[in-house]
Image (cartoon, coloured by chain):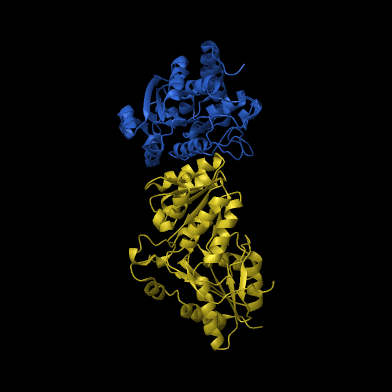
Amino acid sequence: MYPISDPKQLEEIARQIRLDIVEMLYRAGSGHVGGSLSATDVLVALFFNHMHLEPGNACCPERDYFVLSKGHAAPVLYAILARLGYIPREELFTLRQFGSNLQGHPDSKCTPGVEVSTGSLGQGLSVANGLALALKMDQRPQRVYTLLGDGEIQEGQIWEAAMTAAHYGLDNLTAILDRNRLQIDGRTREVMSVEPLAAKWEAFGWHTVEVNGHVIPEISDALKSCSQVKGRPSIIIAHTTKGKGVSIFEDQVKFHGVTPTPEEYQQAVKELQSR
Amino acid sequence: MGALPETVQFPAKESTRVEYGKILAQLGEEYPDIVVLDADLSGSTQTARFAKVFKDRFFNVGISEQDMMGTAAGLALGGKVPFASTFAIFATGRAWEQVRQTIAYSNINVKIVASHGGITVGEDGGSHQSIEDLALMRVLPNMVVLAPADGPETRAMVRWAATYQGPVYIRTSRIPFPVIHADSYTFKPGRGEILREGGDVTLAGLGLMVHQCLAAAELLAEQGIAARVLNLSCLKPLDWQLVVDSARLTGGLVTAEEHSATGGLGSAVSEILAEHFPVPLRRVGLRDTFGMSGKPEELLKHFGLTAEDISKAALTVMARKIRP
């Protein structure tokens, strides 16, 4: 039954999605494991507990919209789309291969459930704004969600879009910031400081909430509370661990875009299966 | 080759950006899904005409062209038909990667209508004179690239774009220039237009250089040379067949554009000729240089973009023609 409210069941889905991510990336031989695993719990709460969706029908006209602004987390999105029945599960393991519908970064021309192609960072929030504006114009009740990376918000366009969302009072928009504290070249505080995060978004006119991004009920509560906010957009700063769920990947800069060796893969699968 | 279109010889001047603003406000009445975005230049781009009538369907995003392109894409995904306008240099330069990634790569139904193309921007100088926009848009898959030759063509193109599904770039100009089409003109995508017949040389232009090509043909006629004049305002997809037919008929071409001679119409025609029917060609355009401040007429003269320059280029081409 959808949506799912039992936290245990949601945690189990998150565990299975993490297994899918590790399997997909191991078979693909390239891709972004760290930022997919950090965002898994947040997206499981969003897709399986909170968003208005119709499993099996990616084009349901009454659906809520999701834009994966941090497009390199495509594996977690694909694993979710497969569980929702938007793409065949076996297709997951064609990720990044020649002729696959699952491109290295999300491509809306190929993959049902991908609303817009992303991958070049900083662009998704603007698209989410446009969707939210269109929904408001037509007095449609749906909401728009977008997932941002904490490195991604170093892009200037994010702050242009942050102004636009507040200016137009887009209270049908919730952004989630995956605050995993790492980016390709190192820790965000070393590469380019992004703090104070909450104060920045508040100063831009956003309703701002901070959660532990690995506690699904906490994420669900935040999503619900943001849906009640009137007159301004919301952002959930989800404090996460990059590579979450596999000890050897956790908080390791290396596992932003490096896939596991056969030994690491075995260990990852073992850990996730025994949880 | 069809019959020559019904043309009106220089009765009046119109500004393509003003005609864009006017037709957009009219289309707003006809198509309730049309929405318009601007980045703090609505007076200059003329979208203010739409904004005045349809306040709730106009979104000023402030000085943030990158955000504007993404917002337009989102509005399109939400079922709207967005027209996004700013100066050509900002629409295609500042926001190029947003246009590429979010609009063209996803093949989203956004219409980018950019004003102030070319050097006839005038006094604002080289920083604001876009001589690269056609090149930047032409390299994008899925993108249709248009540069109307006058007011009637602007109205026809914008009307066409409103119902076409997919990304479109339309370049308008700051200054008024002569009207060459009848009011009844309808735009045919992917088709060039023969404005004047002649067998000695072909003059092919787009935007405000089309009327300069017609004037150049008059100058050549005084010397007994019959020039065929083409309006290639649909730069992408370009009328490949018309270019090859003209090369075959006249044996030599001149392209004319208010743009860098690299990357725009001159390059597009060169590519076709080189691959399919090589004949002598001269490209009238800016040669590896930026624009500068000045009156539009002064700049056109300085950069070699006048009817005289086109006719001289035609003579050069004719001298190089391979005679059987």
Q: For chain A, give the colour.
A: blue
- Residue occupying image coordinates x 60% and y 56%: B160
B179 up-or-down from A166: above or below: below
> Residue B46, image x and y in percent?
44, 57
Of the 4 image quadrants, the one containing the C terminus of chain B is bottom right
> Residue A10, image x and y in percent?
53, 15
The mark total stands at: 0
> Residue A9, image x and y in percent?
55, 12
Which of B33/B260 is in front?
B33
User: Residue farthest to the bottom?
Assistant: B223
Which of A97/A240 is in front?
A240
Q: For chain B, give the colour.
A: yellow
Q: Confirm whether residue A275 shows in the render.
A: no
> Residue B125, image x and y in percent?
34, 64
- Residue occupying image coordinates x 35% and y 71%: B295
B25 up-or-down from B120: above or below: above
* Residue A123, picture quadrant: top left
Of the 4 image quadrants, the one containing the N terminus of chain B is bottom right
- Residue occupying image coordinates x 39% and y 20%: A211
